[in-house]
Amino acid sequence: MAATFRVHIDESGDEGFSFGGGSSEWFVLSAVVTHRNEDLAAVKVVDAVRSQLGKPEKKPLHFRDLRHEHRLVLVDAIAKQRLRAVSVLVHKPSLNEPEKFRERYRLYFYAARYLLERVSWYCRDHRHAGDEGDGSAQIMFSNRSGMSYQELRDYLRVLKEQTGMFDVRVDWEVIRGNQVTALSAGRAMGLQIADAVAGSFFYAAQSSQYGFTEDRYARMLKPVVYHHRGRWVGYGVKLWPREVEARLPADERLRWVKEAYQTKAAGSGS
């Protein structure tokens, strides 16, 4: 049977550790989840926004290349769609033993694990009675030049084997290695939405060269960010490593997390 959900994944920031030498402090990996029968309607928002902004037909919308006022139009449109967004925000300077994450793709794979855990929880809990498919997710990563997606599939296989021994919380009925693919943004409009989500959270956390952050996009996306029983942090917004959460009360750059995503909504669904 075909998958019930479609998941598009993209990133913002880099995996380097040369802080002050060009590397970002933050690396963000984001997923956009749709039910298969609602996917087309959700991703058509890209066409609508492209037309509204007067961009050439079929030209991919890259969030970082858009002007601020154009980003607002795109984010506002995404926030009104029937989809759910999940983001893992990695603060690299806070990682213990950072040398472990200098290995090829190590940081990316760790972030992908945390992301797919949360994607799997959402899909597991939100399969509707009338949904087509077998409850699994078709997962499309934005293609990274030089990266072997077979290595990612192999990594997922190892995680599955380690589930009983380590704290791996992926629902493997939802996440299946043979349903993981990679496409360019131009071939999947859902990846352009994922790019906008990742960019929104990246700019909310990463200071510009002048020391400023822009959290408006991340705040605007709250209506579509995955939450569970009124909790967003730990679900649709995963901060890693855990030491980052301890900094929330004192870090002015992360005030938006406390104000927008740590406010528990009574009687909230997910």
Image (spheres, grey):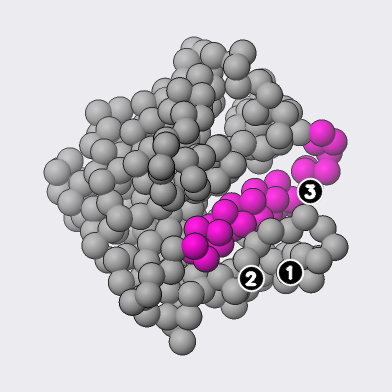
* Camera-side residue of 90 and 67: 90
Q: Which range of residues does the magenta coloring cover?
A: 96-125
Q: Is residue 140 magenta?
A: no
The prevailing secondary structure element of the residues shown in magenta is: helix
Mark 2, residue position: 172
Mark 3, residue position: 103
Residues marked 1 and 2 touching at CB (< 8 Å): yes
Q: Secondary structure at mark 1?
A: helix
Residue 194 in view (yes/no): no
* Marked residue nearer the N-terminal end (1 or 2): 1
- Give residue 71's position: percent from left, percent from top: 30, 35
- Give residue 126's position: percent from left, percent from top: 44, 63
Left or right of 83? Residue 108 is: right
Which residue is drawn at the image coordinates 36% and 38% (left, top)? 221
Vertical placement of residue 214 versus 168, above or below? above
- Give residue 147's position: percent from left, percent from top: 63, 59
Residue mark closest to the camera, 3 vs 2? 2
Q: Which mark is residue 160?
A: 1
